[in-house]
Structures are given as structure tokens and as C-alpha cells.
């Protein structure tokens, strides 16, 4: 038996164990501890920046998955971070874990963006109101114009009728 065949036999025999243990360890890492705290960003941002692995964990063979998971978990456990911001919600799940949602405090650029958005919204509302008033004024003027045209033609026809009656009365 060659060493390569022996290695394939060992990998095949242990791959189920490694896969099961890797899945359990990944689930344990992804679930918060009972009675602990889970701090999340309500904006969907990551709280820490870590380089993404070049190869997906599940593209590796079972022993390599286990070693990669150990490396990633060690890196995550030793990553320092600071969380600050505005607490938007605190909830407690069935395990007693408190989920704390944080919203980042706006920096100077975000405040200028908020101010610009508010001013743009104000200008749009103002334009809508002015255009609405101008449309109402135009509708009102059109009605007055139609009444004036009607009165003009009524005068013309009434004047012609009264003139024709005066002419008839002369004869």
C-alpha cells in the first residue's frame, strides 16, 4: 500500500468527523452565548473589518476546513474593537442574550449630507406648493376669461338684436 492511498483512506475515514465538528463549531461561533450580549449595527455595517478568506471554507477538504475555522475563530476572538453610537433597541431572546442595536453617530460629512437632503426636500416642497398655486390661479383666470368671452358675445348678439328691433320699429 502506498502512502498516498493510506492518506486518502485516512481522509475518507475522518472527513465525516471533521465535517460534523466543523459544522458544530461554526454554529457555536455564530450563536451568541446564553445570558451574554450581542452588539449589532442597525445599519447593516460590520463592527470590525477583517480580510475575507481567499477560498470559501466549504471549498476545502475536511481537515483543511477545521484548520481554517480554527484560524478564523482565533483571529476573531483576538480582534479588539470599540463600539460607540446611539442605542436604537435592546431586546432579549429566549436564551437570555441581550441584542443591542447601535446606530453610528453621524460624522461631519453625514451631517452636511443630512442638511443638504433637508434643504433639497424643502426646495422640492416649496416648488410643489408654488406650482400648485400657479395652476389654481391659471384655472381661475381661465374661468374668468370664459365668462368674459360669453358676456362679450352676449352683448354683441343682444346689441345686434336690439339694433335690428329698433330698425324694424322704424319701418
Image (cartoon, rainbow, N blue to C red):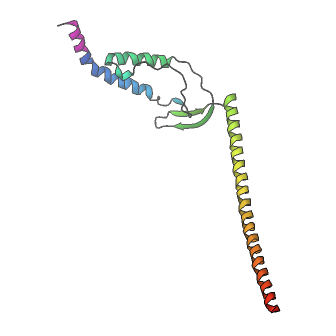
Nearer the observer, 106 or 146: 146
Q: Is residue 79 left or right of residue 154?
A: left
Residue 144's quadrant in the figure? bottom right
Q: Position of residue 48 (x, y in %)?
A: 54, 23
Q: Work out whether residue 107 can be spotted.
A: no
Q: Would you say residue 31 sits in the magenta stretch?
A: no
Q: Position of residue 125 (x, y in %)?
A: 69, 48
Residue 23's quadrant in the figure? top left
Say above or below: 86 vs 160.
above
Q: Position of residue 1 (x, y in %)?
A: 17, 7
Q: Is residue 96 left or right of residue 168?
A: left
Q: Residue furthest left?
A: 1
| Residue depicted at x 70% and y 28% | 108
Majority secondary structure in the magenta region:
helix
Nearer the observer, 171 or 129: 171
Boundaries of the magenta span: 1-10
Q: Quadrant of the C terminus?
A: bottom right
Q: Work out whether residue 79 can be spotted.
A: yes
Say above or below: 71 vs 131.
above
| Residue depicted at x 44% and y 28% | 30
Q: Is residue 36 left or right of residue 106?
A: left
Amino acid at each position: 500500500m502506498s502512502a498516498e492511498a493510506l492518506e486518502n483512506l485516512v481522509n475518507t475515514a475522518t472527513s465525516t468527523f471533521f465535517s460534523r465538528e466543523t459544522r458544530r463549531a461554526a454554529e457555536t461561533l455564530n450563536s451568541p452565548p446564553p445570558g451574554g450580549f450581542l452588539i449589532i449595527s442597525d445599519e447593516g455595517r460590520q463592527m470590525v473589518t477583517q480580510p475575507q478568506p481567499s477560498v470559501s471554507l466549504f471549498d476545502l477538504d475536511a481537515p483543511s476546513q477545521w484548520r481554517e475555522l480554527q484560524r478564523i475563530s482565533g483571529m476573531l476572538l483576538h480582534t479588539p474593537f470599540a463600539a460607540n453610537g446611539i442605542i436604537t433597541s435592546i431586546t432579549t431572546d429566549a436564551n437570555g442574550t441581550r441584542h443591542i442595536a447601535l446606530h453610528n453617530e453621524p460624522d461631519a460629512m453625514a451631517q452636511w449630507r443630512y442638511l443638504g437632503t433637508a434643504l433639497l426636500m424643502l426646495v422640492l416642497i416649496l416648488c410643489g406648493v408654488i406650482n400648485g398655486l400657479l395652476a389654481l390661479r391659471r384655472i381661475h383666470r381661465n374661468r374668468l376669461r370664459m365668462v368674459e368671452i360669453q358676456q362679450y358675445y352676449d352683448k354683441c348678439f343682444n346689441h345686434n338684436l336690439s339694433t335690428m328691433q329698433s330698425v324694424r320699429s322704424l319701418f
